[in-house]
Amino acid sequence: MVRQHVARRVWVLIGAVAAAAALAAAALLVGEFPVPWRGVARALGEPGTAPESVDFIIWEVRVPRLLAGAASGAALSVAAAVLQTATGSPLAGPRTVGMGGAAMLAILLAPAAVAQVPAGAAAAGAAGAAAAGLGLVLGAWWWGSAAALRSGRVLPAGAVVDAVCTAAALYLVVSAAGGLVGPAAHRVVVGSPLLGVEQAPVLAAVCLGAALPAVAAAWWAPSATAAAPVAGRLALVAVAAVPVGAGVALAGPLALAGLAGGGVAWLLMSGHPGWTALAAVPVGAFVVVAADLVARSLSGPQEVPTGYVTAVAGVLVLAVVLRARSRAAAVTTVRMD
């Protein structure tokens, strides 16, 4: 039985990786300026041999945007998988624990010399995310709500914290722009891979470097929270803050992208913390790249920020996860009877 479960999860993981890779290939073909697949293959396989316009579109626009979307989605979804164990709920994510908005606010408040450096922006975001997440857990513990830490009842408070931090971030952006709400303000509030295309290679590597330790931490998360309920959860939140900071520095807070990627991974892996975190890497990349493709395809005078699409995806995943939990609870009740 155990071998069957492991085999199923391995095949699911392989399928998720294959789906993310296929979508990445499609993302290089879609855009305002169509490029045939032969042109894309030539630009990727033999740089400099394709027409100059094709090389520019692929290497200066689409590849950086693809890296930004995939890496930020993977980082935020892995963080969500870790936060699921920390809060005791599959509905946990950077935005529902207050960490996404706090990370964006911290990056905006950081000195320019720090925020303009990829590693500095990621570190500032991680500090803001950690402050919000740790404050939430410590607040629940301080008020004697140990049960809330296990049941996920801290999430409404986290959503409020995120909303306040996002409002503060929007105020800073609007004030800097002279009171006008433009595309940049929308991208700060909901997120878009366009925010980090100029530094995509470096920040994508930072996201990957931040996500891998979080995946490893997810495997020992249940034993850590069982041995030390409060300290274990504090450690998990601190670990999750690092990929949150990197992901937000790259593409903004990407509304509910972590919840969508982490929630789908939770469904695919039946809630196993380690496997969920592992699957969150390709699933999170898939979610954000797919959302970015949808945003690019929507017609209008201005491109729709990707975060609006991830927000819709997050709400849909939330509904599916809630239904799955209610069914599982009903089955458990029947068995007990």
Image (cartoon, rainbow, N blue to C red):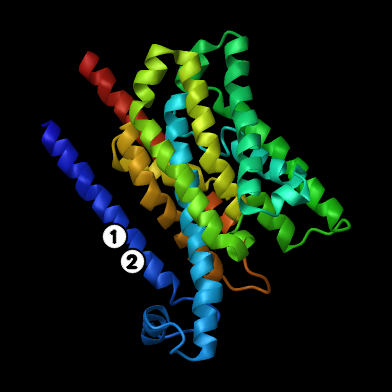
Residue with the most extreme top position: 144
- Type of amino acid under label 1: Ala
The residue located at (55%, 42%) in the rendering is 244
Residue 331 located left or right of residue 251: left
Spot occupied by residue 88 in the image (x, y as percentages of width and height) = 43, 24
Spot occupied by residue 31 in the image (x, y as percentages of width and height) = 52, 77
The residue located at (32%, 31%) in the rendering is 327
Residue 49 position by quadrant: bottom left
Spot occupied by residue 80 in the image (x, y as percentages of width and height) = 47, 38
Q: Which residue is mark 1?
A: 18
Quadrant where the image shows the N terminus: top left
Please say if 113 is above or below 272: below
Contact check, label 2 and label 1, Cβ < 8 Å: yes
Mark 2: secondary structure: helix
| 82 or 147, nearer to the observer | 82
Residue 321 position by quadrant: top left
- Type of amino acid under label 2: Ala
Residue 208 in view in this figure: yes
| 233 or 140, nearer to the observer | 233
